[in-house]
Image: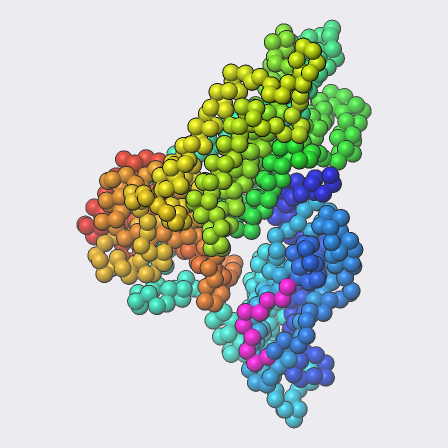
Amino acid sequence: MKRYATLLFMFFACALAFAQNPVKASVKQQPVSGHDDLVDLIFSFAIEPGWHVYGPDNDGGPTPMTFNIETLEGAQLEGALRLSPTPKKVHDNVFECDVTYFETKGTATQRLRLKGGKWKAAGYLEYGTCNDEACMPPTPVEFSFEGEALSSAKDSQTPSSLPLKGENGHLEGGAQGGDAAGNGTGVGTGVEAGTETGAEAGAEAGNEADAQSEVSASSLTEGAEGESSSLWTPVISELHELDAASDTQSRSLWGIFLLGVLGGLIALLTPCVWPIIPMTVSFFLKRAKDDKQKGLKDAILYGLSIVVIYVGLGLLVTLIWGPSSLNALSTNAVFNLFLFALLVVFAASFLGGFEIILPASWSNKIDEKASSTTGLLSIFFMALTLVLVSFSCTGPIIGLLLVDMVTSGSVIAPTVGMLGFALALAAPFTLFAMFPTWLKSAPKSGNWMNVIKVVLGLVELAFALKFLSVADLAYGWRLLDREAFLCLWILIFALMGFYLLGWIRLPHDEDEYDDEGNVIQRPKIGVTRFLSALCVLAFALYMVPGLWGAPCKAVSAFAPPMWTQDFNLNQNTVEATYTDYEEGMAAARRLGKPVMLDFTGFGCVNCRKMEAAVWPDSRVKQLMTEDFVLVSLYVDDKTPLPAPQEVTEADGTTRKLRTVGDRWSYLQRTKFGAQTQPFYVLVDHDGRPLSGSFSYKEDIPGFVKWLEGGLERFGKK
């Protein structure tokens, strides 16, 4: 049981891990005393109490420590990583294997043997960090060192002054970097995360090396027929002037709010919440039997306390993740794999595989607080007790909602969604306290609540496949093409229909008895359940033609793109000819056409909706295929670049671009000032905007007008 609870905590407690890195890491180079041909790369870790940094020999456990070389010239690795002090080795009951880890502090040292002359080493050390409740994503500590080893003892200096020209890497993910100082030589020392250092006043050669280590936007475009730099020139202010204010975000926030309300209503009907309503209302009425107004006031405060708790959860997620982080998570393949596993665990719980519960000590302590305090504080602790006790039913629903809200890319979506959830969950407690007679007509607890849990479990299983599909597309595994995805969804919803008809029973379904006390083999089902089964089976049948290429617009937001389908009879699709920015711009110049840039992602739900609902329209398709050069840039494409490229962001920080997706995300961010997808912009041959941008909006006339406006302006230019 503890294992499943710990897996569940991953999603919520991981938010705290994202807020601040509990490990401060630094890297430095250090010559080995008495050996002119040896250099140590020393990675140091300062670890907050309760957290562990894991060693390299964790088979099947947390992320192991790995040393990764990207460039190695004039040197070779000497042995493996050496850890100091000796890491602890224990058996971890959660991961069910032996693990080694550092506590408080530790170092990992990789020795290099120099071959003589100039040498260079660049790469990163990756490590995993966990505490008892959560794990951080794998964190890289990047390094880049170069120097010159004297080949003879005659010319050598003392080890402390061995000339190692330092170019120390910028560290991402909360790690720290070193700087090189004094005559372009010396040993790197740690600096705080997020800072940027270079060589101090020193030799001119050292300064030049540091200057060349930062790749500007223009250097990313070399080879684009010589016209490189202008294509990457920022046009943010110009685009904003052309861009009319859009209400897309407000509409999407209303959708998120309503989704939260729906989640709250579903949670209300679960066995962990519904039976508590009459007991809670009765408690407030008896508590103030001589003063009905006081009882009503307490019930209202109880409902408001529930709202405050859940909105506080949404606000916490909002404060932890800014808009750029939310968008990065939505396209991050590793994070999507984590969400897939999390939703499978939730689904298995709702299907009766096990019960997810919080530690009993939590609810006991809160209950004691509620008993020992008075007034508003007492009512608040009572509401918190309800939240903890009902977690086995509400937890998976909240998890599903937060997964959808976090990956929506909107910074306030979690807060808005949790507000809707809390209002729907809290309203009955207040309403039944105001009108106690309503309790008599409320449905009694029964097996129908278990049916809701099973149906919700199957829905979560279906949604889990969407997140697996994102990672599958990003890494190019091609395990879950469109037809495979649709087959699984057809099967899941068909089983849901069979369950609602009573043809399938699960272990925790309650038996029904006849008047003589005999178990009814196939219990009767009500009209509502029958109609629900009819709708679900119709939905499963609706997806069947999709196996041969039918658009299936109702599921286009979740299914993989049409181009992943091997057998496709549908020819009414629009696909980009180019997926490279420079190649597409060069083709547009040759053809004399404007360019439509489509910033998209394999995991972008609204991108799939636009491609299925708007692009196939005859007028839209004609404009996009005949009058424009369409260039689709996938910001989550994990194809590695030929070599990592270090770039400087607008705020002065530096980061490395390692994949094709990193490059297109950087282009969208720095040139157009946008980070969410879908993001469409029409540009001329110099990369200047022809009209405002267009985001998710299933408005075919509006999209046609937007395309025609850009085409008209291109003709005038």
Q: Give above or below for 506 relative to 140.
A: above
In this figure, which colouring scheme has been used for the structure? rainbow
Residue found 54% across the figure and 23% down from its top: 501
Q: Position of residue 685 (x, y in %)?
A: 27, 57
Left or right, residue 282 beside residue 241: right
Work out whether residue 24 can be spotted: no
Q: Residue furthest left?
A: 716
Q: Is residue 57 magenta?
A: no
The magenta region covers 66-75
Q: Position of residue 10 (x, y in %)?
A: 65, 44
Left or right, residue 151 beside residue 590: right
Q: Position of residue 18 (x, y in %)?
A: 61, 48
Work out whether residue 601 can be spotted: yes
Q: Which secondary structure is most common in the magenta stretch?
A: strand
Residue found 28% across the figure and 39% down from its top: 617
Q: Position of residue 229 (x, y in %)?
A: 35, 63
Picture quadrant where residue 153 is located: bottom right
Q: Is residue 72 magenta?
A: yes
Picture quadrant where residue 558 is located: top left
Front residue of 629 and 648: 629
Front residue of 73 and 378: 73
